[in-house]
Amino acid sequence: MSEVSTVKSRASVMMYNNEKKAWEPAEGVRGMSHVQVYHHEGNNTFRIVGRSMTDHQVVVINCSIIRNMKYNAATPTFHQWRDQRQVYGLNFHSKDDAAQFKDAVDEALDTL
Ligand SMILES: CC(=O)N[C@@H](Cc1ccccc1Cl)C(=O)N1CCC[C@]12C=C[C@@H]1CC[C@@H](C(=O)N3CCC[C@@H]4C=C[C@H]5CC[C@@H](C(=O)O)N5C(=O)[C@H]43)N1C2=O
């Protein structure tokens, strides 16, 4: 069973550096990425995958959407969430990109 992408938005992927108390671009990428929500229908799991726009081979972010995850739309174009290891941030290209992405994440959270 393959995975189905439910949204594709443009955003720059950031990670929060807890030591430096600052946001940094995700590993190996500068600038915009395509961020997608993938649904694995077989086991009803979801993950957020980001690939660099300049080189789609570079996976910039790949993390599960877990039940009851708090997805925070801090501003209309900056959304963030955390897992045990770190805090992720998406600085979207536009409010539409952000809104579409949030809808897909909310939909995933509703079905988990
Ligand atoms: C309870 C909890 O976990 N709270 C978390 C948030 C959260 C809540 C609920 C569920 C999950 C999470 Cl994750 C929390 O508050 N966190 C997570 C780590 C960082 C932060 C802590 C302090 C700083 C203060 C300012 C604020 C911040 O980071 N921004 C303000 C809003 C947009 C603003 C936009 C863009 C980014 C691009 C660079 C920097 C800039 O614009 O130059 N910046 C910003 O400055 C951005 N912070 C945070 O978000």
Image: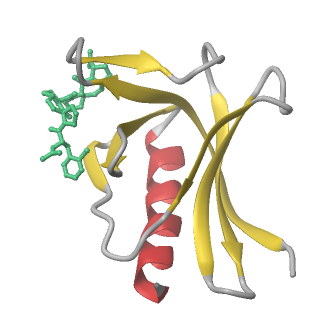
Residue 50 found in image quarter: top right
- Can you say whether 7 is above or below 29 in the image? below
Looking at the rendering, the quadrant in which ligand 1 lies is top left
Percent position of residue 111, x then y: 48, 87
Foreground residue, 79 or 81?
A: 81
Q: Is residue 7 left or right of residue 103?
A: right
In depth, the one of 105 and 93 nearer the eye is 105
Q: Quadrant of residue 42?
A: bottom right
Q: Position of residue 103 (x, y in %)?
A: 47, 67
Q: Residue at x 45, y 27 (%)?
A: 14
x and y percent of residue 77 in the render?
38, 38
Is residue 65 in view from this perspective?
A: yes
**Image height of 21 relative to 50, above or below:** above
Q: Give the side of residue 70 with respect to residue 55, left or right.
A: left
Above-or-below relation of 38 to 99: below
Quadrant of the image containing the N terminus: bottom right
Rendered residue at 33%/44% (across/down):
80
Q: Quadrant of residue 15?
A: top left
Residue beneath the point at 67% across and 86% down: 43
Which residue does the image show at 27% across and 62% down from the upper left?
Answer: 70
